[in-house]
Amino acid sequence: MVTALDFQLTAPILILTLGALLLLLVEVTLKSDSLRNGITAGSLVASFLAPIFFRDAYTVGQTAFGGFVYGDSFSWIANLMITGGSLAAFVLGYKSIESQKLSSKSEFYSLVLMSIVGALVLVSARELILLFVGLEIMSIALYTLSAFNLWSSRSSEAGLKYFLMGSMFSAIFLYGIALLYGLSGSLMIPDVANWVVTDGASSGVILLLALGLVLVGFAFKIGLAPFHFWVPDVYQGAPTVITAFMACVIKSAAVLVALRGLWVMFGEPTVFAQWADLLWILAALTMTVGNLIALRQKSLKRMLAYSSISHAGYMAVAMLAPGINGGAAILYYLVAYMIMTFGAFAVVMAVADTAKEGEEGDSIERFNGLGLRYPMVGVLMTIFMFSLAGLPPGFAGFIGKFYVFSAAVEANYTGLVIIGVINSAISCYYYLRVLVAMYFTKGEVSNLNVKAPAYALMVVCALFAILLGVFPGALHDMGVDAIKGINIPVGTVTK
Amino acid sequence: MMQGISEIFNGYLLTAVTFAPLLGALCLYLLPKGKDESLFRVVATLWSLITLGLSLLILCSFDSTNPALQSVESVDWLPQFGIKYGMAVDGVSLVLVLLTTFLMPLVMIASKSVHDKIRGYLANMLILESAMIGTLCATDALVFYIFWELMLFPMYFLIGIWGGQRRIYATIKFVLYTVAGSVLLLVGLLYVVWQHADQAGAVTFAIADLMNTKLTLSEELWLFAACAVAFGIKVPLFPFHTWLPDAHVEAPTGGSVVLAGVLLKMGLYGFYRIAFPLFPNGAHVFAPYLATLAVIGIIYGALVAWAQGDIKKLVAYSSVSHLGYCVLGFVALNTISATGSIYQMLNHGVSTGALFLLVGVLYDRRHTRAISEYGGLASKVPVFSFLFLVFTLSSIALPLTNGFVGEFLILNGSFRVFPVLTGIAVLGVILGAVYMLTLYMKTCFGELDEKKNGELEDVKSHELMTLVPLLVAVFVMGIYPQPIIKLYEPTLKSYISQVESKRVAVTSVDSDKEIVLARSLALEGK
């Protein structure tokens, strides 16, 4: 029996699907830029407001469509993060999309909206096949989007690479789901979780294999080392807006689904102990590989790609601490990470626009002398870089790291935290290198012209990066509230 | 009347002192751009004077006979983690706050030699002042840590933008060294916090509560080591000192003054505020090693200083040597030596700060700091040479100057605890005299090279304005140290007995093998 509640809980998904279809219609009838932008912006804003409007519908244990979709606080916050991030990406990119020679802009936007739909389905799915469908909707749209710059061989390479590797890991993930179904006899996440609690510890190697495959599938989407090889190429090859979109929104979706899926299904203490070591290694590797390779990058876009890998590593550290503090830490970190990454990408895009035809837009030399010539942009970028490095005055990044490391120390992973903080110190080098270029090096860039929407986005991001750090309580409370409702198997929830 | 003014702040006087400079920095950016440079300088100086005034208000309301933390402020910040925005001062932090607020107006006046992007320079200085005062006043471990890290970035820009030839190398080295140290400090603090939460049932970051955490000896050793690396880098303790000469040489004059005057003291203050009270047993075990490193620093710093051909580098290495005395006095942890250690921190701020200002005076005129470029300055620039002589003597601790009081107390007190090490440290006093007097001789005596230094101007009025207060401080602190010592001695006395009592208390509670070892060490120390 379908009720109004079902539609309220899935409103963002429905709105965006409708928007995507409308855009395709526009493409064959009226080819108007403003109409295109209007539809995209309208559906994005509506999908962002819908969860806020229907806040009361999201309650503990709530589900929609016969239990196939989650409707709890975690789902609420996940919806907000994904739609909010997408909205930011649109604000960041629509001006530059207008000026680009894309073959079909409506298709472009339609695909973007589709990938958001996929991400939303992914994070709300309560059933494993639906979850997989969400994953595929999201990924297939992204394969196309990364290859969208038809005239750039890098872009085509990115698309192909992403597609080949992505399909393989989707298959691996699907195999994991199949094994889980075989073991537990159900595809519903709560049923699988119940089965793991009662029979998991005694089921031996098959469960381990299944959860290993699922873990690897998630690790690929999040970009955890050693499954990160696609990230730098795809991030550098894709149009920069898409890179920002993937680094923020898609990565968040992957982290959110992994957080809930892994903790709820495999959080039972004896089972958790079996994969905790594996995750420990992944986290340590991811932080270290991401940071060490970022040290040597000359392209800022590629540097941000590797930095995003290392940030995923920090979040994986907190994933070792199933429970309220660990979960709230990851949610806070995700928001902080999205804010500072969007801000940094906004600056990188604006600076890349100063490149003349045939010049490399994203090389770090473009930043030379920028901070003194354009003080406002300089200050904003400084805040983002300090925030990404986890140093005051970029407070959100610092508090995020504090929450993450604090949760891991609480769960007795002090060794991993030491690796984490050493990495965090290493990362200072390459983030500060941007500041060295901006402030300590002479340069001749003089035609920086930041478009109003991107400027507004930078300012908002910087304000949030500071405000969220000075008053982190509200967001953290929301995170606590969300994690309380997700039913991590008893015994592992700390304090 | 003073009471009346303090009441305006309604119990938030420390917050006012901490954030006044930050407000000043904002104020600078409200001024119209492109205006006369001197306007920025006046405004910044004014704000630093306001801060000085406010810090004097703390002094007025401070009860020096009471060893406890005073002017306590506490506001919930992250209640889930029991983190409070907590501020308070005791005697030791008060004198260091006063040193900071006393030096900053002088730095602002000295900024007259900076012409490039003056607004940013002054704003960074003011932000730095806020961060330093905040670090000194924080009573909550996380707030302390945040202010501690916040000190980094203004200094990073000060060296990076207004520094010398190799500024980028120097500033990155400075930041990486400091960050690498302080991240370990963060892990250490988190570990203690969660141990404490397990024992007490509630999470808190208040340093006063964390002191009651029960830790095994091996935990304390690890945690103390983590802190010691963080704070040792800042001091800087041999062998973590290599960032200092680079940073000093490349920093602009004002940056060097702040670096030597206040920032270096933060390392020792960290030992005082965090490492020793939280991990007294670890501190006890490590004390001889720290003292050894300190003495190596004293001798090594002095020898390297002797070999320098660059005046600023010489003064920078002399800092390594002088800070060695402070560490030695502090880790000996008796009332006399620790009193001397804190006093020596103030002295070093005054005399080394002044020496850096004097180097700046020379550099502004000749754009070189090579000792060989100078000679016979006494006949050409008498006022400069006189001031240089006074601060040189103060640096080598001649009686009646401030340096003497500090070094005497340190050596006197440490001798009872580390007789051999102190014996070696005394050699450093002699070496100090050697390299400083050699420097003075080479620059101010001998023949004047007319071609090079014939046109040299003597100290100008604004330079005098920065140097005379320091000159007065040298003699006041050297002849009549009592009022200053009285401010922090009660605090220090109760601090030492508290650290020592906790050392015994912890070892007598538990009974596993490690603790037996701790007890025997504690007895051996008696």
Image: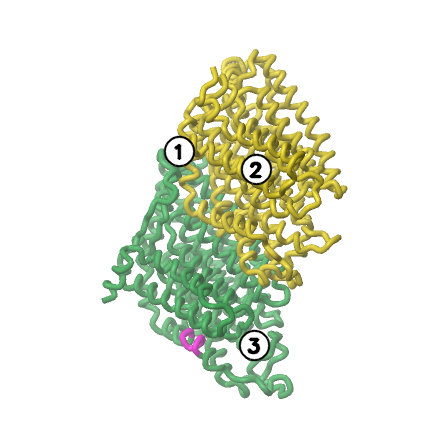
Chain colours: A yellow, B green
Residue at 49% over, 73% down? B37
Mark 2: secondary structure: helix
Q: Mark 3 — on which chain does it sit? A: B
Residue at 71% over, 45% down? A101
Residue ID for mark 1: B198
C-alpha gap between disc 2 and disc 1 = 54 Å
Answer above or below: position of A41 versus B333. above
Magenta segment, principal secondary structure? helix
User: A54 or B444: nearer the eye?
Assistant: A54
Residue type at mark 2?
Ile
Marks 2,3: beta carbons within 8 A: no
Residue at 59% over, 13% down? A183
Look at discs 2 and 3 and give the one toward the viewer: 2
Mark 3: secondary structure: helix
- Mark 1 or mark 3: whose residue is earlier in sequence: 1
Q: Is residue A411 visible?
A: yes
Is B64 on the left or on the right of B279, as rendered? left
